Amino acid sequence: MQNVITTDINYCQQLLKENKLVAIPTETVYGLAANAFNEKAVKQIFEMKGRPLFNPLILHIHDIAQLQQLAIAIPDKAMQLAKAFWPGALTLILAKNDFVPNSITGGKQTVGVRMPNHPVTIELLQGLDFPLAAPSANPFTRVSPTSAEHVAYYFGNRIPAILDGGPCKVGLESTIVGFDGEHPVVYRKGGISIEDIEAVVGKVTLVTENETTPQAPGMLLKHYSPNTQLVVSNTILDTIREHQHLKLGVLSFKNEFTHENVTVKTLSKQGDLEEAAKNLFAALYELDELNLDLIIAEKFPNTGLGASINDRLRRAVSN
Ligand code: TXA
Ligand code: MG
């Protein structure tokens, strides 16, 4: 199974030109990529993920100039954000240009676009004359992959290649920003904090709490789910005691406590939120492999990337 993992960029370009799927590394999470302008290739992405067709895909570009071809009526604040954060963990939702296929946008009149900050994928994109449509490379509702091996676990024998760019440096999906007229609206908290976005464009509206009729369908409450049941706790030791008859795993922010019969993953001994974000999904994935009865995750401080981490943990609870 491991031989689908490759570092050969030319080979992956060839596959993509033949309208085949390739998993690609980005700084946020790995993506399941295809030629955005080939309907058959795009359809395969939805099939592979088991993803509903109404849930739109984002387009990956390597040059800000491509934005003008994909989107129309781009708000000034969108350009400010693109200039401030691209390449990086920011997806902009913009009014789509006519030739962006409806299969990409799930029938919406808007399109999501992002320039990833990963040298391997930028080089890959530079050799292609089409953008790559790429959702996170996980089956629908599961935890996003942050390494090539993690993708291989999900899809190894079903995709022609996984382009290995090492472990993802950010480890959380991109922050998604759309616009109500000129006003920025955050649809998904992610790898760039709300504070950093507001420092560039001023106050934003958060709609990420809306789960019944999500603006971004990825905000369905059940998402990012391990198979193992998960709870979030402010008082880890109490929660362990409460469930001590069970086989437990703990996701701790910075404390390295040991407890009999409990597997503990500490996300950042230094208490650094960026380091914790980078390690979050891999730790969840590893705990999920242990056949535990329950994973107890510590509630994070609700600032910076801590807010994005709490968002993912909250959704992982809804099994
Ligand atoms: O970091 C990321 O964004 C990763 C890497 C691979 O780039 N991609 C990713 O894609 O997380 P995906 O499909 O798993 O999540 C993208 C989210 C989905 O929830 C989708 O519903 C939303 O973006 N989205 C895409 N286009 C949209 C649109 N036009 N309007 C509203 N939401 C949109
Ligand atoms: Mg996803």
Image (cartoon, rainbow, N blue to C red):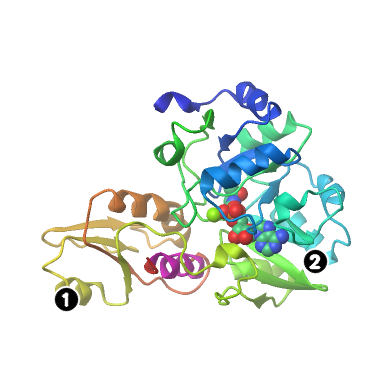
Tell me which label, 2 or 1, sits earlier in the chain: 2
Residue 192 visible, this angle:
no
The answer to whether marks 2 and 1 mark residues whose Cβ atoms lie closer than 8 Å is no
Q: In which quarter of the image is the C terminus?
A: bottom left
Cα separation between marks 2 and 1:
49 Å
> What type is the residue that disc 1 sits on?
Glu
Q: Give the range drawn in magenta.
A: 307-316
Q: Main secondary structure of the magenta part?
A: helix
**Does the magenta portion include 31?**
no
x then y, percent, for residue 307: 50, 70
Q: Within 8 Å of ligand 2, the CB of disc 1?
A: no
Residue at image mark 2: 77
**Does the magenta portion include 314?**
yes
Residue at image mark 1: 242
Q: Residue at x 51, y 66 (%)?
A: 308
Viewer-side residue, 123 vs 14: 14
Q: Which residue is drawn at 45% across and 62% down?
A: 273
